[in-house]
Image (cartoon, grey):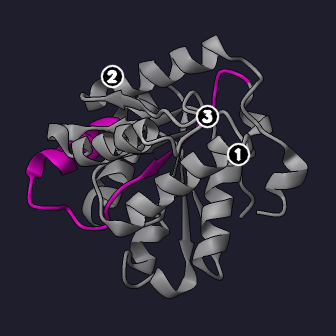
Amino acid sequence: MSATSSAENAGATRAICVYCGSSPGKNGTFRDAGLSLGGAIAGAGHRLIYGGGTRGIMGAVAEGAMGAGGKVTGIIPRFLMNKEATEAALHRLDELIVTQDMHERKHAMFARSDAFVTLPGGIGTLEEIIEIMTWAQLGHHAKPMILANIDGFWNPLIALLDHMREAGFIHTGHRVRPIVVEDAGAIVPVIEAAWAAHPGHDDGVKSIIARM
């Protein structure tokens, strides 16, 4: 299936990428936040781009979006199809993109998205948002980046980023400053405000992106 590109989403309807855990975690609030965010993305008329999982917080985000009548693109490597999801459940998505590996998955998620939200998750979730922050630092994009700091989950990462900045290792702090939002229900309005404040300046250098 073909995907909706960032350029095609330049109007009112855009695509929001959500990174999160394929497990529910020990705090039920995390899954609730996923449901709320998915519903809010759909309710605002935007497309959800996510890692294709049908379990854990991933599954909750997709469930929330589909339950609200939203469009959902799942992007998943073939080798994870029966680990993070089931093929039967994946066919509920209105768009499914199967990649050969994790690198292809991450690039596809980046290319198709106009903003990035990071809900609680593990090492893979952390790696995904750190890579997006790295590309922002290098000037490859200026798309909004949101840390969904549900129940203070990302406080250690926020403290680490502040420590790195104070120690002189982040020299473009204005680029590597994800917006911290505590309430899942407030995330979409924050993203829309960021889009409105910087219209047409988020796509980065396409010739560089193509090589990433």
Residue 119 - label: none
Q: Is residue 133 above or below residue 77?
A: above
Q: Of marks 3 and 1, which one's residue comes earlier in the chain?
A: 1
Residue 35 in the image: state x and y as whole percent: 27, 43
Q: CA distance from mark 3 to mark 2?
A: 27 Å
Residue at 72% x, 31% y is 202
The residue that disc 3 covers is 172
**Residue 205 relative to residue 65: left or right:** right
Q: CA distance from mark 1 to mark 2?
A: 28 Å
Residue at 52% x, 14% y is 193
Residue 136 in the image: state x and y as whole percent: 64, 42
Q: How many marks?
A: 3
Residue nearer the viewer, 24 or 92: 24
Residue 1 in the image: state x and y as whole percent: 71, 64
The residue that disc 2 covers is 186
Name the amino acid, label 2.
Ala
The span shown in magenta is 11-37
Residue 138 - label: 1
Residue at 35% x, 42% y is 163
Q: Is residue 60 above or below residue 64?
A: below
Q: CA distance from mark 3 to mark 1?
A: 9 Å
Name the amino acid, label 3.
Thr
